[in-house]
Image (cartoon, coloured by chain):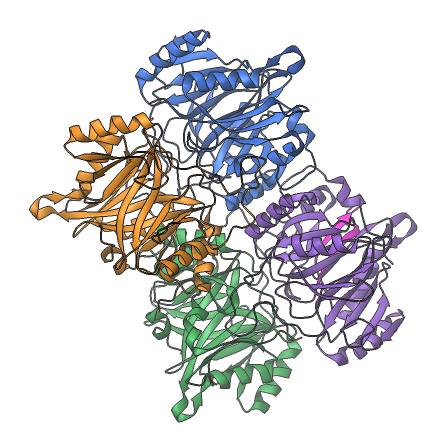
Chain colours: A purple, B green, C orange, D blue
Amino acid sequence: MGVMRISHVSLSVMDIEASINHYVNVVGMYLTHKASDGTAFLKCWDEWDKYSVVLTPSDRASLNHVAYKVENDSDLDLFERRINEYGIKTEMAPRDALPFCGRALQFRLPSGQIMYLIAEKEYVGKAVGVLNPDPWPDDRHGAGANFLDHCLLVGELNPEKGINRVVDTSEFLKATMDFSLSEKMMYGPDASVLGGAFLFRGAKPHDIAIFGSTGPGFHHLSFFLEDWNAVRHAGDIMGKNRVDVESPPNRHGVTRGETIYFFDPNGIRNETFGGLGYPSYPDMPEITWTPETAPRAYFFHTLRPLESFATVFLPCS
Amino acid sequence: MGVMRISHVSLSVMDIEASINHYVNVVGMYLTHKASDGTAFLKCWDEWDKYSVVLTPSDRASLNHVAYKVENDSDLDLFERRINEYGIKTEMAPRDALPFCGRALQFRLPSGQIMYLIAEKEYVGKAVGVLNPDPWPDDRHGAGANFLDHCLLVGELNPEKGINRVVDTSEFLKATMDFSLSEKMMYGPDASVLGGAFLFRGAKPHDIAIFGSTGPGFHHLSFFLEDWNAVRHAGDIMGKNRVDVESPPNRHGVTRGETIYFFDPNGIRNETFGGLGYPSYPDMPEITWTPETAPRAYFFHTLRPLESFATVFLPCS
Amino acid sequence: MGVMRISHVSLSVMDIEASINHYVNVVGMYLTHKASDGTAFLKCWDEWDKYSVVLTPSDRASLNHVAYKVENDSDLDLFERRINEYGIKTEMAPRDALPFCGRALQFRLPSGQIMYLIAEKEYVGKAVGVLNPDPWPDDRHGAGANFLDHCLLVGELNPEKGINRVVDTSEFLKATMDFSLSEKMMYGPDASVLGGAFLFRGAKPHDIAIFGSTGPGFHHLSFFLEDWNAVRHAGDIMGKNRVDVESPPNRHGVTRGETIYFFDPNGIRNETFGGLGYPSYPDMPEITWTPETAPRAYFFHTLRPLESFATVFLPCS
Amino acid sequence: MGVMRISHVSLSVMDIEASINHYVNVVGMYLTHKASDGTAFLKCWDEWDKYSVVLTPSDRASLNHVAYKVENDSDLDLFERRINEYGIKTEMAPRDALPFCGRALQFRLPSGQIMYLIAEKEYVGKAVGVLNPDPWPDDRHGAGANFLDHCLLVGELNPEKGINRVVDTSEFLKATMDFSLSEKMMYGPDASVLGGAFLFRGAKPHDIAIFGSTGPGFHHLSFFLEDWNAVRHAGDIMGKNRVDVESPPNRHGVTRGETIYFFDPNGIRNETFGGLGYPSYPDMPEITWTPETAPRAYFFHTLRPLESFATVFLPCS
């Protein structure tokens, strides 16, 4: 019952062919459909649903929406009621309004992004199949990303005006969709301002995260890799393909994940994220990061700040 | 709501000091309590509850019981009702009947093992704490196991007599406690006999598994390691400590996990299990292994059978 | 000046196509030439000479010879003199007697195998080229072996008759070709019998090794892999290709190398060997393994003996 | 015969205790001697000679000298003659002029640094011993560096004035001490200026390297780690110890080594360098890097330049 995982991220991109090339040959996805309007649908090899990334041609890059999948169709009715009761309007889009999906519950997060909940998406199957499967497919390519892992949103944070969309969206996700908080980053002189929140539904350290900044934005979409060795392989692939890597291999303090941040041809930040980190459960004690150690929370291996990481975001539709 | 994870395995052991030494210095656990009767309680560094292994002095080695943790205390009432309705008797043990635990729902699985469900266990905390934590503790030692991951039970399988405790226990876990099946191993000339079942509640490939054999038994308890490199480290530690390793590093076909099987000083089989493998969700398609490839299902890297793996089990109390 | 490294191993094989398939698709070599008589020449991606494995069609599998490369052509004259003075006959084969090679100094080791020394072999180049090279080639495949690393010979050891070809060949290699001993395995009640010797010329732990047994034989040829992660990948490739793996991933005590032993379609033992282990220099203290720990010397991760490893050899031409 | 490897780097440091703490607890060395004047001698666990780093108290940080070890004492006479014939003055320091060393041949490289050649240094032994050794010592600590691998010098490069100490020192090392060039970095509009040279004597990709810049300097000393996994461990250790990491884990284009650059408490750049990369031999084709790809030559995983890497050096005594 309830939200299972991130299902897809829908992005507007400027150069659709360069973008497809990036998600296929660098990230390692598979193109599963291309619509007549040029919209591309891609999945990772270990995903069984039709797509986890949608790229729509546009004259500027932006986030269209993020979608999460729930276990049962009836969950959509439950969440519709809960979200409305929370004071946020929803719209139930009919089957196929989101391509290859059943009906979809749409709403806008307090931080400004459009979110969908869906219960059905066309089944394609893992690349390794379900009968005596190999541990990975023979045609694994690029960084060989296993699956879309999570996304990180940006919301307005202005304590002087009493605005904190990190709090607002976190509380909303917890109250209406039973997300739990795994880690939080506190800011301000007395570490009293929640500036970063990591939330989970499954047993991974996070399924969604939100940071505070100047306004609504999208920070990155993140793809899971098996481990630290897969992270090196991903780095090698990015080097071979002259990808704009913002942060070479490092360890996160938050989640312990092993990370590379890089940009697709539209300047949309991607992450490859290695390893489980730790399994999350509702009774896991919350982890707190205080301001003086915030840089280590992001990049544990170095004390030198990475300015672009805190300032470069994608706008939202 | 519901079962979250394995909470502990309780074992009777012959040489308590040698056993403690094994779980501390080889597996990498921490002794958190030693009772006046000699019973030892141990936890891994990334666990927050008081213990995940209990060792009770005895004149023979056996499984006492396995315990799983549920999210809410009220879940115990729900599962009591469901299990009774399923036709299996339960007993609600009072607080502290299981040391350091709240009330505990006890019952016997169709395959013969005693299982407990608990909702509370004394909180100790992760070794790295919850404030600006390091990714691993400075005093990590031995194989440095992160947490108890799962256990594998053995039940009677006698198709000629119509007995299949693999089916019985799997169906029971699914019907009463909402477990899902991730992978299944089929036997028999037409691959129609379920001989091995892997079930999950969280997002890991399995939280419990059961194999068919001559009767009730316990196959192994398994500890999670970060990745393949941690598996090599574990192998090095076992070599240094002259541990009886049954199967050196290998890849499972089932779950894709990276594995070492080894025995504690009582002949109780342990596993160190590296990597997430894949995340499980209720909508993940079931994976099937057919008889001709069964050896690869266990040990993907070699075709040579390992006879002891299928024949050596621990008796159950 | 002097011997640089192993240059190739020449093997007689029964099924040439199955053998080529094995060395290409499992080991990861490249076929660089196929002669009119069916003889196949293969190299690894990081080697620059024309071949490191030669496969000649035959009705039985055997070792034809091993070849080592010296730095200068004039070294061949030096070694011819030294070897003759040592009391072993040599023959200087003319250019192209060994295909694609300059003149070749041939002789028979005390342990019975034919060895060649060469100074020239046709240059092909690394797969990544010499101008701004990538760290590995895009068409890396199979286990992706970097280069042929070493071979292990078998010689007669019969202390009762005063025969020890391990001593004889080791002394010969040291006296005539300036090999140094890195590690030695001692046998017998007082650990006085040299039963295994590991010798090097370059900075790797060994370039050649010899074990004692019933008579002349060839134990294995070994291919270098980057590290433990590449060893897992190799194991996955062998699993996918149903290769007969004798020993899944393990750590050697001797050399610390990370190893898999497996057989090609002719029953010829191969090894993939991961990591440098340690750099060897003439002033490195010799390492000694005594009989009681001999099993750990081979396979550090397990105490269980692997009988075939000590009894299955390839005959020599 | 000839130069075997780097033997030690002698550094002047300001805070000797903080420096010892760094090389012991971060790098993972062992303090083997502390002289009455406060000079500290340290070795790595897999080295057998008394020390590979010397720290002498001073009021400023600088390079005192680098020392390389030759195979035989008579090699010193040979190199004295060759170097004098090359036109560079030498001085033969008596036994113990360099502490714990035999006589030492001193000279100044064309690029300005003092180099010593020695044939003897007090033997201490590897931490794992020579009898049935474990693959690594139980008291391995910090980043657990295996051994000092190489150093990188800086020499004046001023093509307009016809000054190129990269060429001068490379030619000197090749002509007098039989070093070979593995890789070279070319600069200038027609890629005709040698701006970086990597030279080897053993089978590792480099034993010494030199870059061109404004004048004599010392760029870094580098410690070998087993593999990429050990690089992550080193990064974790640096994060735990708040080390000033200049460049988190990355892959070199040159040598393929896996690297972290970081500074000791005196601002002296260290490197941890993972993996063999490839074995070098005199017949290996030279690798050339052209100006447009120079950034990738250093850091293959990212295109973003690291300015401090090209501008921050240590002065030479």
Looking at the image, which residue is at 59% across and 78% down? B179
Identity of the residue furthest to the front in this view: C36
Disc tally is 0
**Residue B91: % across, % down:** 53, 84
Identity of the residue furthest to the right in this view: A161
* B192 w.r.t. C76: above or below: below
Asked where in the image residue A20 lies, by quadrant, the reply is: bottom right
* Magenta-highlighted residues: A182-205
**Residue A278: % across, % down:** 60, 58
**Residue C71: % across, % down:** 36, 29
**Residue A49: % across, % down:** 68, 70
Magenta span includes B241: no
- Return the residue nearer the eye: D256 or B24: D256
- Return the residue nearer the eye: A199 or D252: D252
* A178 w.r.t. C147: above or below: below
With D217 as the anchor, is A185 left or right in this view? right
For the question of whether residue A266 can be seen, the reply is yes
Magenta span includes A194: yes
With A163 as the anchor, is C30 left or right in this view? left
For the question of whether residue B96 can be seen, the reply is no
Looking at the image, which residue is at 62% across and 35% down? D245
- Return the residue nearer the eye: C197 or A109: C197
- Return the residue nearer the eye: A217 or B91: A217
Quadrant of the rendering where the N terminus of chain C is positioned: top left
* C316 w.r.t. D145: above or below: below
With D138 as the anchor, is A163 left or right in this view? right
Identity of the residue furthest to the left in this view: C161
